[in-house]
Each structure stands twice: as structure tokens, then as C-alpha cells.
Amino acid sequence: MVAPALSLSRSPSSSVSSSPVDRCPRSTAVFRRYGPSFAYKPAAGICSASQAIELLPSLYPEIVVRDAQLEDCWEVADTHCSSFFPDYKFPLDLVLRIDRYIALLSGFSVPPGCMRTCLIAVNSNSVNNSFNIECGDPRDARFQKYNLSRGSIAGILTIDTVADYLPRRGPLKQRRTGIAYIANVAVRKEERRKGIAKMLVQEAEVRARSWGCQTMALHCDVNNIAALHLYKNQGFKCIRVPEGAKWPEPKIAKGVQFSFMMKLVPKI
């Protein structure tokens, strides 16, 4: 069976009948995307996206999407872990955050010619001068509170052109170019239903266009119906993976299946 080309034909329809949304844990400006150094077992089907209608983003002017900076690293790690692993308790939840934080700090370098950035949605109404992160269950006697997070980041998204999760091209297994890959789309529980995930995906499209990319791609947990709905409404289409093809996929937990989705980057 011949593998389909990694491109989409332009069609008048921008949608078909997930993050972070997407269950692929990867994450300022220019982060390395890779998961923590030990295995995670997240529950499938958890959606960290909001399902807001078109008008909702304009109703929340306090939400601003920008590139993450060095001082945002801990909060990005905290948002990532609290969204994808909400049931983890102290001390494992703290260990997860530290592991993710180290991954972010060590991820500034990318291969020559590649781009990577972490977009964050900042809620200006939540910004304060103190740092707070709650680890564990407050009802638990072992509950600990650490003053490390400002609580201003409402959502995160990573986009890059490294192509680690795209099939290589040709007999020499060359890295694919012109494709921006989205990962780690996550929105804090208290900030959902505001169209934040949609704002992040739309800003990622702007970055992909500025990088000269023709298409965008992502993996989404097939059980994450809400995330699939979000992406399809943003114009992403599921791409059939040829039977027996060994296309790279994120490794989250055993048994998790993904839909590989792509979208053409509209020209202005």
C-alpha cells in the first residue's frame, strides 16, 4: 500500500465531521520537546481545551497570548502537569513539575534551521507578585504548599519545525521541512470555557506562517473527543496512516492511540 503524501489539497471546507486538548506532553521561546525522564500513565480522554464559540475570545480581553520567557518556565511546567496529570499527589506531583522544569530549561537548543517556541496565554487579572503552587490534596495531612508559581498562565502550547514526530523523507531519512508541529496544548481547569485553546492554536498558525511553513500537524488522543472536535473546527483533518507504517508517535502510556492531523496554513 502506497503511503499518502504529507500534504493536504486545498478545499473550500475547513473542517471535518483534540491540546495541553491534545494528550501529547511536550513543551521560553524555543523549548525542546520531550517528555519527563520516567513513564507517565495519564488517563485517556481528558480534554484540557475550551469549546468556546467564535465570539468568546473577544469577550476576554484580559487574556493575552505571547511567547514564554525564561521566568515563565516553572509556571509552564506547573500548567502542563496540573492539566495532564491532575490526579498525581505529593510528592510525585512535585517531582513531575521539577522534571518538566528541568526539561524546559535544557530545551533552548534546536537543530540548525529549525524553530521552536512555547506560546502561553496570560490572564492579566490573575497576575500577582507572589508565587504559589499547591502540591497534593488539601484534605491530605501531607499536603504541602510551595510559593513557586504566579498563577497567571492560563494555557500553553508548543510549536516547532523539528519534525521529531513526522515520518522522515526518502531513503536517507531526511527531516521534513515546511511543517509546523503542535504539542502540549493545555488550559488550566479554572480558565476553561473562554476560548483560550482556540486562541493558542490560532496564534500558532500565525507563527507557522511567519516561519514559512505550508502545513501544520499534530497528534491527538482518539479518545479525546472534545480535543478532536476543537482541532477539526480549526480546519485540521485526520490523515490516514498506511497499515503497517511505522510513523513516529508520542509515547505517553501503553495503549494510547492517536489521530494524526494536518492543516494547510492559509495565505494572507
Image (cartoon, rainbow, N blue to C red):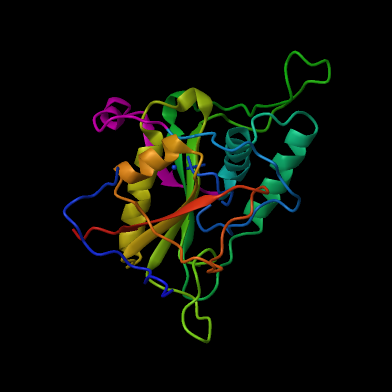
Whether residue 268 appears in magenta in the rendering, the answer is: no
Q: Residue 64 versus residue 189: which sits nearer the camera?
A: 189
Which residues lie in the magenta part? 50-69
Q: Residue 136 versus residue 221: which sits nearer the camera?
A: 221
* Quarter of the image where one finds residue 53: top left
Q: Quadrant of the N terminus?
A: bottom left
Residue found at the far front of this picture:
1
Along the horizontal axis of the image, is 73 left or right of 210?
right
Along the horizontal axis of the image, is 42 left or right of 57?
right
Q: Percent from the top left, x then y, of residue 26?
A: 58, 52
Along the horizontal axis of the image, is 192 left or right of 245?
left
Residue at 33% across, 29% down: 52
Q: Percent from the top left, x then y, of residue 183?
A: 50, 51
Q: Residue 222 versus residue 215: which sits nearer the camera?
A: 222
Number of disc labels: 0
Q: Quadrant of the C terminus?
A: bottom left
Residue found at the far top of this picture:
139
Q: Percent from the top left, x then y, of residue 223?
A: 51, 40
Residue found at the far right of this picture:
142
Q: Percent from the top left, x then y, of residue 258?
A: 52, 51
Residue at 58% across, 34% down: 83
